[in-house]
């Protein structure tokens, strides 16, 4: 007898993990979930301009701020911006990768994007993207720190990870002055390489090869509050009341 479970996830070992327990020996028939767009962007030319001027424009604003802080004498109230810029770059990469590959799994999307558009910039993006994504992107977005890396049962070989904020900082190299296993990326270099993957590579693909399906993939995603979402609907009414005030 078939039973609807609603949602499952796939772990790093490619095992299906349902949110609710199921009986041993259960077989799964899975349909990949696709986000519902709130609408379509008006054209591929508009999409290219949006990515260039807004997505990369915001990242360039962060990078400019990082460079300008170096000119300020009193830096006590300012940080290096390295984690923030790297986080923004990974968010942008996730967006570009979904437009390109369109799967529900972000890791699968970024690996596909890296092989096609980032590997020509630097081969290590294609060879290391999964581990970069898990350590740096997931660590920064979900835990505010990039995650050190070790193999199970052998923490003596712990890899210390770091993020620089200038083009001169280490990128895909060990961290200077650390006498143990280490690995660093430069957020400034990541931004530069990501833009090089967009222009001309990904930009040309969008304008010449991609179908109009990219206009829905690139559009804002709809947050649709289900019938049983009592808390969400309660807060939706609060938004309505705020608009009436």
Image (cartoon, rainbow, N blue to C red):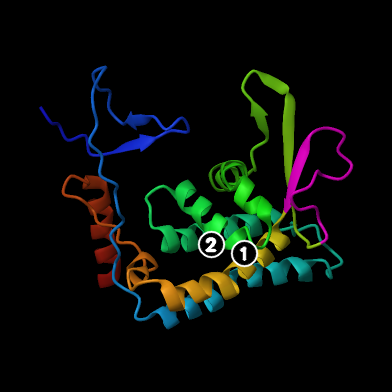
Whole-angstrom CA distance, mark 1 to mark 2, is: 9 Å
Q: Which label belongs to residue 222?
A: none
Horizontal and vertical percent position of residue 114: 56, 56
User: Which residue occupies the foreground of this view, 65 or 100?
Assistant: 100
SS class of the residue under badge 1? helix
Where's the C terminus, which quadrant?
bottom left
Residue 230 left/right relative to 13: left
* The residue positioned farthest toward the left in the image shown: 1
SS class of the residue under badge 2? helix
Instruction: Give the extent of the magenta segment.
Output: 168-185
Residue hosting label 2: 92
Q: Which label belongs to residue 194?
A: 1
Q: Is residue 16 above or below residue 112?
A: above
Q: Please name which of the two marks, 1 or 2, marks the residue nearer to the observer.
A: 1
Give the quarter of the image for residue 215: bottom left
Horizontal and vertical percent position of residue 213: 32, 69
Evaluate if marks 1 and 2 touch, with contact meaning CB atoms under 8 Å apart. yes
Q: Is residue 75 visible?
A: yes
């Amino acid at each position: 007898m078939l039973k609807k479970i609603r949602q499952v996830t796939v772990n790093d070992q490619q095992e299906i993990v349902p949110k609710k327990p199921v009986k041993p020996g259960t077989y799964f028939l899975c349909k990949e979930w696709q986000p519902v767009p709130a609408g379509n962007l008006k054209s591929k030319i508009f999409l290219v301009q949006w990515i260039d001027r807004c997505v990369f424009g915001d990242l360039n604003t962060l990078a400019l701020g990082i460079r300008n802080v170096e000119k300020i004498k009193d830096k006590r109230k300012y940080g290096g911006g390295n984690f923030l810029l790297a986080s923004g770059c990974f968010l942008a990469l996730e967006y570009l990768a979904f437009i390109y590959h369109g799967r529900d799994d972000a890791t699968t999307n970024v690996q596909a994007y890296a092989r096609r558009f980032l590997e020509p910039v630097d081969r290590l993006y294609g060879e290391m993207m999964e581990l970069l994504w898990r350590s740096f992107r997931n660590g920064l977005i979900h835990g505010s720190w990039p995650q050190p890396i070790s193999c199970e049962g052998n923490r003596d070989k712990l890899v210390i990870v770091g993020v620089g904020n200038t083009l001169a900082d280490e990128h895909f190299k060990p961290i200077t002055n650390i006498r143990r296993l280490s690995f660093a990326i430069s957020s400034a270099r990541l931004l530069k390489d990501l833009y090089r993957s967009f222009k001309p590579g990904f930009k040309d693909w969008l304008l010449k090869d991609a179908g109009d399906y990219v206009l829905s993939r690139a559009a804002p995603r709809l947050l649709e509050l289900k019938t049983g979402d009592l808390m969400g609907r309660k807060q939706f009414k609060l938004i309505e009341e705020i608009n009436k005030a």
